[in-house]
Image (spheres, rainbow, N blue to C red):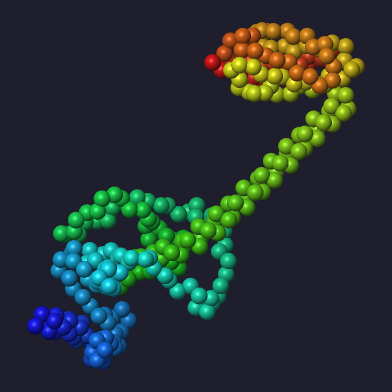
Amino acid sequence: MKKIINFTLILGILFFANTNYTYSQLKVLSNGSVEINSYALDYGRAVRTTVHNPNACAYHLTYNGVDKFYVSASGFLWCSQGGYFGSDLKLKQNINKINSPLSLVMKLNGIQFDYKEDKGVKKEKGQRLGFIAQDIEKILPGIVKTMPDSTKGIAYTDLTALLVEAIKEQQNQIDELKKLINISYSQKQIIEESNESNDLPNLKQNSPNPFNKITKIGYFLPETIKKASLFIYDMNGKQIKNMPIYERGNGYITINESDLQPGIYIYSLIVDDKEVDTKKMILTN
């Protein structure tokens, strides 16, 4: 008796859903399936379900006793294994690359938000993430849909392609910057090596810098140099140390933490009474 009542209720709902369209057809087949033919107009209702409890289910599909697809009256949709959207090449035309994807992404403003409460609907914990459809429509109008009641929606899956292309564009920019940095570093090495090969004195940056134990200051002095010294000054210009250099060629001077107080210092290489170079070093606690 219960099955008969349920079946009658289903028939009544389906009949009521189609009373506005005289061409609607309902068939109950002997194998238990139901077919509905509806000639609804644009945005017409082929099948309509009115649920008066916001926490109730508007459509529920189960298989082998397991929930597979669920549409809540409060407005969310749930499916057990995600969804697939038609994306086959044969379904598409006018295919083009996305122009300036990174610049488009930079115009998007992601937000955190709460959905407005409906009467009787329990508010979910935690804010949601997304966009404002009106803002997206100004940038990507093709992925925004306006319903007959003027409510706007976003095809969020379309944003995946935009983000992928934006990441690729950004990575290309990063790769180009790396090349420029490598070229600059190589040119610097060539200049330094050239200076050394041309018997020009030079001063290197201390390493490590900053330091808290020991640091080494490298230099190059050609054999023709008569006298050379490394001078260390504090940030007020006061001379702290004068360290004569007697070795020629490539060498280094070791600075220990006990030689200085923690702070910032300037050191200069003076060769034959002329300043060759000045650099900065930092001693930490």
Q: Quadrant of the C terminus?
A: top right
Residue drawn at 73 percent across, 39 percent down:
184
Q: Nearer the viewer, residue 232 or 125?
A: 125
Quarter residue 247 falls in:
top right
Q: State the residue lying farthest toward the left.
A: 1
Q: Nearer the viewer, residue 115 or 88?
A: 88
Residue 195 is situated, as x and y percent measured from the top left of the image, at 84, 28
Residue drawn at 43 percent across, 66 percent down:
143
Q: State the residue lying farthest toward the right.
A: 224
Residue 11 is situated, as x and y percent measured from the top left of the image, at 17, 85
Residue drawn at 63 percent across, 52 percent down:
172
Q: Quadrant of the N terminus?
A: bottom left
Quarter residue 269 falls in:
top right
Residue drawn at 18 percent across, 73 percent down:
50
Q: Is residue 24 visible?
A: no
Q: Is residue 212 visible?
A: yes
Q: Is residue 175 above or below residue 237?
A: below
Quarter residue 239 falls in:
top right
Residue 78 is situated, as x and y percent measured from the top left of the image, at 30, 65
Q: Is residue 190 above or below residue 158?
A: above
Q: Is residue 123 above or below residue 95?
A: above
Residue 48 is situated, as x and y percent measured from the top left of the image, at 23, 78
Q: Is residue 5 left or right of residue 203?
A: left
Q: Is residue 223 above or below residue 190?
A: above
